[in-house]
Amino acid sequence: MIKYLLFVFACFLTFKVFAQNPTGKYLKDVQTGCKIWDDNYTTKDSVSWTGACKGNYAYGKGTIVWRRNGREIGRYVGVVKKGLLNGEGKYSFPEDYSLEGTFINGNLNGSGQINDNGDLMSGTFVNNILQGDGSLRFKSGLMLMGHFIDGRFVNLDQPYLNSLKRNIKFTIDKNRYANNQDSNTLYYYTLSTQAPIKGALILLPSSGESAESVICCNKQLMQLASDNHILTLVLSINNGAIDDDNTTLSFLNKSFRDVTAQFHIPKDKFILSGLSGGGMLALRYTEISRQDSSKTFIIPKALIGVDPPVDLAGLYNTAKRFITTNDGIPNLSEGRKNGLLEAKMIVKDCDESYGGPPEQHPNEYIKRSMYSRSEKNGGNAQYLIGVPLRLYCDPDILWQLKERNRDYYDMNAADLSAMINFLSLKGNTGAELIPALGKGYRLDGTRHPHSWSLIDPSDCVNWIQKLLE
């Protein structure tokens, strides 16, 4: 599988973080002789201070201005002790970014606010990172209030929030996986429930999406699952192949092994689900478990895919058509610009991973696809003939025509319906296509068919319960 730029609204804002750097150094203001800490020191830096000195260090109230090559790169107005930000103050940067509140040894600690070009994060900070109760106010007018874990918004109600646990156990190559702030660490969340636990629902993010975003987008689903004795597991992995990358498969297996040991859930009581690239991972993991069970720790009971691409050859050809239609056209909308960027990355990744287009390397695409329309046996879909599954899509052709210049042939719904038709003809009575027309919305209220909101929480939990009985 390749890396897809299928952007999802993240229900927390990823703010830049400035913390005291071990490569920093004290600089001397040439006017006052006072020493001031420069967090990201280079030989081109200089500093000025308007205030008092104590023991040759800046001390008390005043203003610090950091410059690089004579250009201002940072300004602090507030209380300083021993050349470090200590006390109430405001630390500003030229790119409309500022930290304001209580500083301890150079970092925001305690009550404060971060302003990122008009987007405001407020609450209690620990080393510049919001922890506990707080709020996000976007310049668009959207307001989010609730609980933050390491600066990330987690939108769950009490008492569910007390049952949410984060497990950090896996260090990986940060160049291959991205989960925002901790890009070199994979982790997972569990939302536990009271005994007896009937089973587990796995939620896998789309490419580039955070685990916290998944929690926010599935608040009602997760809380309803907990009420019905179903544990929810949200994994942070949002990039990576599963056919050619043992790290991906290893992380999934280790996570499932941990959860079964901790909560005593049978291996055949897991339901895998995911949005977009996450849905692709869920499908391929389940296919591999049926093809060679020695490679997977669990054999999933059932599957949920939320608008995942399933035929990589079709995905490649769709991307090529989009590039041909839109590349070089002036004044493209933001949506079409994003679509063009995504299409170019898909083609580039496929060319690098598979050696070129599908007509030149058909077997490479068939090997890694969840379903292959060109194959009579459905390709890897043949391993799902006995698996209950739901594939969700929002086949809003008018939105696709207006926002993306795409027709029916370019929608995931076309291949998803073909896959369900193939499975049904092969005797899978539990294979369902859920056309959630008009249900796709992001958390900010933006209309988008490629969203977690396609799942109806109550209907989904009822379906899961029947499978686990």
Image (spheres, rainbow, N blue to C red):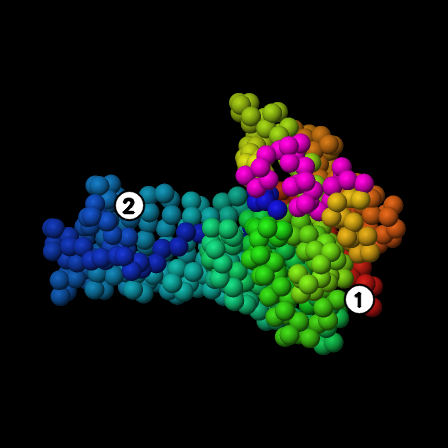
Q: Amino acid at mark 1?
A: Leu
Report whether residue 128 is seen: yes
Q: Is residue 39 above or below residue 341?
A: below
Tell me the residue at 80%/44% (across/down): 377
Residue 129 position within the rendered picture, expressed as x and y whole percent measured from the top left: 43, 60
In the picture, which quadrant includes the C terminus? bottom right
Q: Is residue 167 above or below residue 444?
A: below
Tell me the residue at 56%/26% (across/down): 327
Report which residue position mark 1 lands on: 468
Query: Label 1: few (<14), some or many (≥20) within 10 Å?
Result: some
Tell me the residue at 62%/52% (across/down): 242
Q: Nearer the viewer, residue 391 or 17?
A: 391
Alpha carbons under labels 2 and 1: distance apart: 58 Å
Q: Which residues are magenta?
A: 352-376
Q: Is residue 123 above or below residue 338?
A: below
Report whether residue 222 is seen: no
Label whose residue precedes the other's in the sequence (2 or 1): 2
Report which residue position mark 2 lands on: 73
* 171 in magenta: no
